[in-house]
Amino acid sequence: MKISAKELRNSSTKIIEQAAKGTEIIITVRGKKMARLIPFDKEMNTDIEQDEIFGLWENHAETQTAEEQVRSFRIGRKF
């Protein structure tokens, strides 16, 4: 099923209900395919902790804490 972004804006509840029932919906902007709306599948949802890239720099020697990083940004420029 193809719909325009305007149709999605005007009747989003009905369209989301259709997607929840299993209908794949392609959203177009000026006739060009831009996005796909598919039903949420609990089996496809993975935990962030299991994601390969999450925590990539966790044990890196040069890693700063978030607070240290923000403080280094706030030091300002030296001319």
Image (cartoon, rainbow, N blue to C red):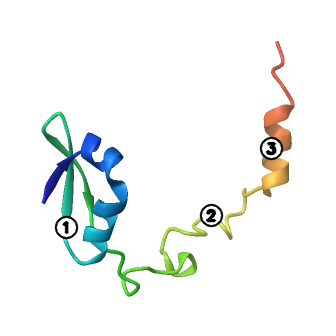
Towards the viewer: 28 or 50: 28
**Residue at the image point whose x is 20% and y is 61% from the top:** 25
The dot on residue 70 is 3
Secondary structure type for disc 1: loop
The location of residue 7, given as percent across then percent down, is 25, 46
**Going from the N terminus, do you reach mark 1 or mark 3 first?**
1
The dot on residue 57 is 2
Work out whether 35 lies above or below 1: above
Mark 1, residue position = 24
- The amino acid beneath tag 3 is Val
Crowding at mark 3 (Cα within 10 Å: few <14, some 14-19, many 20+): few
Q: Is residue 46 left or right of residue 34?
A: right
| Badge nearest the viewer, 3 or 2 | 3
- The picture quadrant where one finds residue 55 is bottom right
Work out whether 65 lies above or below 47: above
For the C terminus, the image quarter is: top right
**Residue at the image point whose x is 52% and y is 80% from the top:** 47
The location of residue 3, given as percent across then percent down, is 18, 50
Secondary structure type for disc 3: helix
For the N terminus, the image quarter is: bottom left
- The amino acid beneath tag 2 is Trp
